Each structure stands twice: as C-alpha cells, then as structure tokens.
Image (cartoon, rainbow, N blue to C red):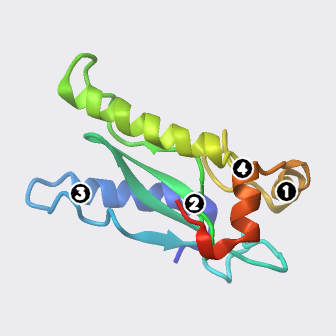
Amino acid sequence: MIMHISEAKDLIATIYSIKKQPHRHPSLFEDFNWYLSESSPDWYQEEFWYPFSCCLVRAGSRLGWRWERKFEFTPDYHFEVNWLDALPAKGSSEYQSYIQALQDMQSRMDRFPFFKGYHQPPTEAVYNRLSRQYRPSREEMEMWENPSSSHE
C-alpha cells in the first residue's frame, strides 16, 4: 500500500535499483501492483470507488512504471508511462521491439483516453472536473452497459 501518490516515484526507484542488480531475476515485481491506501489523504471520496495502483511496465527492453485505475468489469484506465530506462538505440532490434510495444500502449490509450496526458492521479477536484467533461467512446459505453461481454 502507498500512503501518498507522491511516494510512488521513490518506491519505484527503489524497486528499479533492486531489479538492476545482476543477481536479481529480471521479472521481479513486473506482475505486481501497489495500491493507494484507503487511509491515504489522496483517496477520493466517491460513491463508487475503483482504486488507483501503480505498476512496472515493459516496452521491449525498456522499463517504466505508470498509475492505473482498475475496474472490475471493463478495461482499466492507464496513465502515461514514466520511463526508467534510456531509449534503445535507433535502428537496433531492441528499438524495434520497443516501438511496437509503445504503439500497442498508445493504441490502448487512444481507445480509453481518460488519463491521457497525466503521469499520476490528479487531485480529486481535477478528477471531478475531468469526469464531468469526459465523453466516453461508443466502445466504452457498450462495455459499461454490457460488462459480461467486455474486456480487452
């Protein structure tokens, strides 16, 4: 659990330094999410709550992390990626696999753009404004109306 949204960057930096040690398993922590604690002062006071979490992400050989909003029956909403590794050299095979994975991530962000442009959860006031102004796509509306047939 994370007590403050601002603590995620330091948590990830610590995990990243552990992952970079040569004797560590490369997939350490990659399928793990850290959730914002319900007792956090950053917790939103909503009627229907779906938690914010942060996790490591990989695009080719490049490692980064991002926040997510996890939902039960529809796709999660992702924030922009905070990259930890340098960009692979252009023209290399690592660069090509990075670009392909990045395009896949971008395609998903374009389909469900609620947090596009955000690297971390905004304040509750900003979130409420975004919620009022957001116009879901037809695909999102269908998923919300018929959750049993949805998911990425």
Q: Mark 1 or mark 3, which has the lower sequence index? A: 3
- Going by the numbered disc 4, the residue's amino acid type is Phe
Q: Mark 3 or mark 4, which has the lower sequence index? A: 3
Q: Marks 4 and 2, Cα distance to the nearest angstrom?
A: 11 Å
Establish if 41 lies above or below 7: below
Q: Marks 1 and 3, Cα distance to the nearest angstrom?
A: 36 Å
The x, y position of residue 73, in whole percent, is: 62, 74
**Is the residue under label 2 in contact with that under label 1 (CB below 8 Å)?**
no
Which residue, as the protein is rendered here, is positioned at the far top? 91
Q: Mark 4 or mark 2, which has the lower sequence index? A: 2
Name the residue that disc number 4 marks: 114
Q: Nearer the viewer, residue 65 or 58?
A: 58
The x, y position of residue 139, in whole percent, is: 69, 53
Name the residue that disc number 2 marks: 68
Establish if 39 lies above or below 75: below
Q: Residue at x 23, y 57 (%)?
A: 19
Name the residue that disc number 3 marks: 19
Q: Mark 1 or mark 4, which has the lower sequence index? A: 4
- Going by the numbered disc 3, the residue's amino acid type is Lys
